Amino acid sequence: MKKYRAGKIKREHHVIERVWPVLERMAECELIASIIPGPISPLNARGFEVTFQRFTDTGLRLLAKNGSAVQEVWVVTDAKDAALHWLAGQGLVDWQPEPPPVKKAAIPTGPEPLKTVVLPSDMACEVCGRPMLAGSRAVRLGRKQYTYAHVRCAKE
Ligand SMILES: [Zn+2]
């Protein structure tokens, strides 16, 4: 069984460090016919990841990075979508399903509205860098991490 699984993985190229065990687990998927590691390129980056790039005529194109090298991996499958879901579900490939389309009416037109707030404490304006005093009116910027700016600065 182990040998059969390993036979799914083509050995035309060497496989970069840490990627082989991931490919072996991919080969366990019945949806996947074969896995073809591509050429290796040097890379200066941290971390290990295998990401989904795109669908191809024969299956999926993945990109594996192990911190010092990057390598394309082609997965051959007739069930592209199901195989991708399987790989993502197993945690083997970083991939998020497309978010559902947003209704057009829900998309605001024009610039994002700026929220005017009263500053709780002294801070520097995000735009001009000059100080703003607690209790004065300012504009709050950003969605998750808020920054603040003079009302005039934010409108420029
Ligand atoms: Zn300012």
Image (cartoon, rainbow, N blue to C red):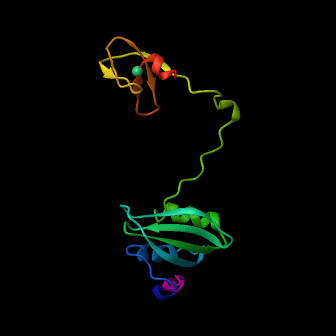
Residue bounds of the magenta highlight: 5-11
Compared with 118, 90 (above or below) is: below
Q: For residue 42, which quarter of the picture? A: bottom left
Extreme residue in the bottom direction: 3
Compared with 131, 75 (above or below) is: below
Q: Please state the horizontal and vertical placement of residue 78, each as a whole percent of the image.
A: 67, 72
Q: For residue 140, which quarter of the picture? A: top left
Q: In this view, does 149 lie to the left or right of 26?
A: left
Q: Residue at x 41, y 29 (%)?
A: 146
Whether the magenta-drawn stretch holds residue 36 is answered as: no
- Count of numbered labels shown in the rendering: 0
Q: Please state the horizontal and vertical placement of residue 79, each as a whole percent of the image.
A: 65, 69
Give the image quadrant in which the ligand numbered 1 is located. top left
Q: Please state the horizontal and vertical placement of residue 81, each as a whole percent of the image.
A: 63, 63
Q: Can residue 146 be seen in this view?
A: yes
- Residue placed most toward the observer, 149 or 129: 129
- Residue placed most toward the observer, 140 or 149: 149
- Residue placed most toward the observer, 57 or 41: 41
Q: In this view, does 79 lie to the left or right of 85?
A: right
Extreme residue in the left direction: 122
Q: Please state the horizontal and vertical placement of residue 48, each as a whole percent of the image.
A: 39, 64
Q: Which residue is drawn at 59% across and 67% down?
A: 83
Q: Which residue is drawn at 44% across and 79% down?
A: 15
Q: For residue 120, which quarter of the picture? A: top left
Q: Is residue 28 visible?
A: no
Compared with 150, 82 (above or below) is: below
Q: Is residue 47 left or right of residue 56?
A: left
